[in-house]
Image (cartoon, helix red, strand yellow):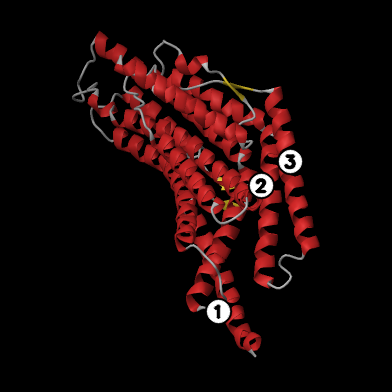
Amino acid sequence: MYNKNRKSLLGSYKIIQHVSSKIIGLAPWTLKVSSIFSDREQIPNRNITYSSSFIGIVYNIILFLGIASFGIYKMIVNAMNQRFSNSLLAMTIYQLLFVTLINASFIPLIYFIQQKSMMKAINNLKIVDFLLNQCKDYTLESDYTNDVIYAINVLMNFGLITSDLFTSSVISVLFESIPSIISSGVMIQYAIQLNKMNRRFSSINSAFSKLGNHNLKSDINYVPSETQVVQSRALILAIDITKKAYIELCEMCEMITDFYGIPILIAIFSFSVRALFTVYILILSIVKSQFFIISWYLLTIRIIFAIFLFTTLTCSVTTIAKQNKRLALTINHQTDLPEIDEKVEKNLLKFASDLRHLKIEVTACNIIPLDRTLLSIVTGTIATYLVIGVQFALSSRPTRNN
């Protein structure tokens, strides 16, 4: 009874994730609900099936046109009313928000154009899990990291929007929040897909580390029994199956990386810009160079939110990039064990040799690395513009006072 209720709850949460992603244009495909609530024993990752949706495509096109038209309309209205004519900083921030809004509006368009590669990658998880579950030592434990980070993302966005509604109009809040909602959704969705890949890479590493438990050879004069010969053949078959699944996982990582190339670039730009002017306003308020009516807790939450998103993404990328090296070390360690059968050892060495050509590189359009190097790039860029901006504001203060 408990397992049935737990399965139903997790299935409902998965549907909520899909619906919320579809609303912001990050899920133009259709979710097969029966694969979630099926009574059959499912593989622990709760794999689901996606298929293309005409309604989803039309919705994403309408969403793109709606967001872009809304941004242009808002800029025209503000230009006609000359709302920020007396404040260069406010005008600059508003223009940057407009740029991020227009950029974010293209993300739903990109999603439906490239959705086939993404659906293929997601649906191939079932094939990979089917292969890996034929291996005796392979286990894929349940993990709720993806559910937690998705919930944190939703709660942070909801909290910021709700707080902004107390001080600003609905239209202004939408103008400022839409880029953040879509961009944060892309970053979290990307991290979730990478985490799914990483769980399988980690389980493969764990399975290979257990090969030494199969005592197939005790000394140099050992003559294997019929049972141990069968066991040796089973291990060789398991290595071949795992290799096939590993290659498939590497190809899936490549497809996912290609799919998220442009969207993740837009997301990084949007949050970098937002983090830049958030910290800029905070610094100017502290040194009292310019007067701002600000909510300190909101600025702090925005900065924490940006740090959370960048850290979550870069940690997922860094972890998955380490799996290839870790597996090579694990295999080399197993081949050094004296009890490993010669035929098994030969297959392991062949697999280790092939790993040299199966490197996993996760980048944004082959331009920006998405591992922890991204944190230093973003931090350095923001710091540079902050120094220039703050110096300019401080140097212009005496002139303005005179």
Estimate how packed mark 2 is, as few (under 14), some (14 to 19) or many (20 or more) residues with alpha carbons within 10 Å.
Answer: many
Residue 76 is situated, as x and y percent measured from the top left of the image, at 79, 56
Does 79 appear above or below 51? below
- Numbered label attached to residue 289: 1
Q: Which residue is mark 3?
A: 66
2 or 1: tag closer to the N-terminus: 2
Q: Is residue 236 visible?
A: no
3 or 2: tag closer to the N-terminus: 3
Q: CA distance from mark 1 to mark 3?
A: 38 Å
SS at mark 1? loop
Tell me the quadrant of the picture where the C terminus can be found.
bottom right
Residue 303 is situated, as x and y percent measured from the top left of the image, at 48, 58
Left or right: 334 in relation to 201: left
| Residue at x 63%, y 44% (from the top left corner) | 263
Residue 67 is situated, as x and y percent measured from the top left of the image, at 71, 44
| Residue at x 57%, y 54% (from the top left corner) | 271
Name the kind of residue labelled 3 in the image.
Answer: Gly
Left or right: 187 in relation to 224: right
Residue 233 appears in which quarter of the rendering? top left
- Numbered label attached to residue 104: 2
Tell me the quadrant of the picture where the N terminus can be found.
top left
- Numbered label attached to residue 86: none
SS at mark 2? helix
Q: Is residue 82 visible?
A: yes
Along the viewing direction, whichever of 34 and 111 lies nearer the viewer? 34
Does 313 appear above or below 341? below
Q: Are marks 1 and 3 in contact (CB under 8 Å)?
A: no
